[in-house]
Image: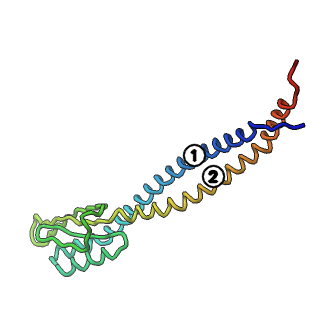
Amino acid sequence: MTHPIPFRNQIRVRFLLVVLLISSLITTLVIGLQIYMEWNRDLRQMSARIEELAKVYQKPMELAVWNLDSQGIQTLLDAIIQHELIDQAEVIFQEGYYKSGSLEPSDQIWYFQFPFSITNHENSDKGVELSGIFKLRSKMLRARQNVIDRILWIGLGQLLKTTLISSLIILCFRLLIGQHLQTMIEYLYTSEEPS
């Protein structure tokens, strides 16, 4: 004769909750760490790409500034903002200020500044010096959007992995330990009380 075993379901539910809670906590920590690493990596990559872009354009910009070629300066600035990472470019020097692109005041921007100095020794022994600043700005929204896209994929992957691992742990618990506990509980309920 078997008696109802009230604790069997409670043990299963408790174990299931503990496994899911621990798995979810670990998954959340892993996702957080992964997102932090991805964010830093994206920022480093964007920074390196913008610095490379500035190196490509800086010499032609210095030449256009030296020659006070307004059309050349503006053409270079317009070309720079065609790059996907650049939203605004400007050059500031003693004789002028040129800008291309626009940003909203509410935009959070990433700001890069590349000072330059040009010296020409052709006309005098001391040389004539012209200095200025080449500035590039990029919206932080791009980096955030990349991370948000990754969060979705990482989150879905981790959720799937957590579900599969939790199911495997619960199955193993049931097969290896649960049946022994069930047998022990049944034994306790079916044994006669001592007189």
Which numbered disc flags the more N-terminal residue, 1 or 2?
1
Which residue shows up at 32% across the image and 65% down it? 138
User: Would residue 193 be found to the left or right of residue 80 on screen?
Assistant: right
User: Vertically, is 171 above or below 114?
Assistant: above
Q: Position of residue 24 (x, y in %)?
A: 58, 48
For residue 193, which numbered disc appears in the image?
none
Q: Residue type at mark 1?
A: Ile
User: Vertically, is 102 above or below 109?
Assistant: below
User: Would residue 9 be found to the left or right of residue 107 on screen?
Assistant: right
Q: Position of residue 66 (x, y in %)?
A: 17, 73
Which residue shows up at 28% across the image and 61% down it? 111
User: Dot 1: what SS?
Assistant: helix
Q: Nearer the viewer, residue 31 or 67?
A: 31
User: Vertically, is 125 above or below 23?
Assistant: below
Q: Are marks 1 and 2 in contact (CB under 8 Å)?
A: yes
User: Dot 2: what SS?
Assistant: helix
Spatial CA distance of label 1 from label 2 is: 9 Å
Q: Residue type at mark 2?
A: Thr
Which residue shows up at 40% across the image and 62% down it? 143
Q: Position of residue 51 (x, y in %)?
A: 34, 64
The quadrant where residue 126 appears: bottom left
Name the residue carrying label 2.
162
Name the residue carrying label 1.
26
User: Would residue 137 be found to the left or right of residue 151 on screen?
Assistant: left
- Quadrant occupied by the N terminus: top right
Q: Nearer the viewer, residue 65 or 42?
A: 42
